Amino acid sequence: MTSDAQEEPLTPVATPMAPARPKPPSSREQRRRRRRARHRGEEILGWILVPLILIGVVWGVNAILEAMGTSPGVVWDQLMQVKAALEKKM
């Protein structure tokens, strides 16, 4: 029984060099990364806080009007009456 594969003498195979350690980021790159992270955090906070602030303002206006014994609808109707009266005079 013969083998088709020929035996070749063992020769050292060039092994690839171990991967080089990545260089630590420069101070500029670190600053850029911090700035990007800060901007991302501010965007997230903005998307959360702005609606909360607007809801709080609406709630506060309603609370103040309720304390004065009126409502936004009544105030709006009165403003429209004033507008109609001013348009009549002109």
Image (tube, rainbow, N blue to C red):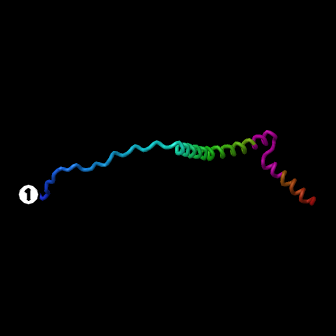
Magenta range is 61-77
Identify the residue position indicated by label 1 in the image: 2
* Quadrant for the N terminus in the image: bottom left
Q: In this view, does 4 lie above or below 17?
A: below
**For this rendering, which residue is in front, 59 or 26?**
26
| Residue plotted at (79% across, 42% down) | 65
| Residue plotted at (74% across, 41% down) | 60
**For this rendering, which residue is in front, 48 or 64?**
48
Q: Quadrant of residue 61?
A: top right
Left or right of residue 60: residue 88: right
Type of the residue with mark 1 = Thr
Residue 77 drawn at (x, y percent)? 82, 52
* Quadrant for the C terminus in the image: bottom right
**For this rendering, which residue is in front, 50 or 73?**
50
Residue 44 drawn at (x, y percent)? 59, 45
| Residue plotted at (58% across, 43% down) | 38
Q: Residue furthest top?
A: 67
Helix, strand or loop for disc 1 = loop
- For the stretch drawn in magenta, what is the main secondary structure? helix
Q: In which quarter of the image is residue 83?
A: bottom right
**Crowd rating for badge 1 (residues with CA inside 10 Å; few <14, some 14–19, many 20+):** few
Residue 10 drawn at (x, y percent)? 18, 50
Query: How many numbered circles are shown?
Result: 1
Report if residue 70 lies within the magenta region.
Answer: yes
Left or right of residue 89: residue 46: left
| Residue plotted at (44% across, 43% down) | 23
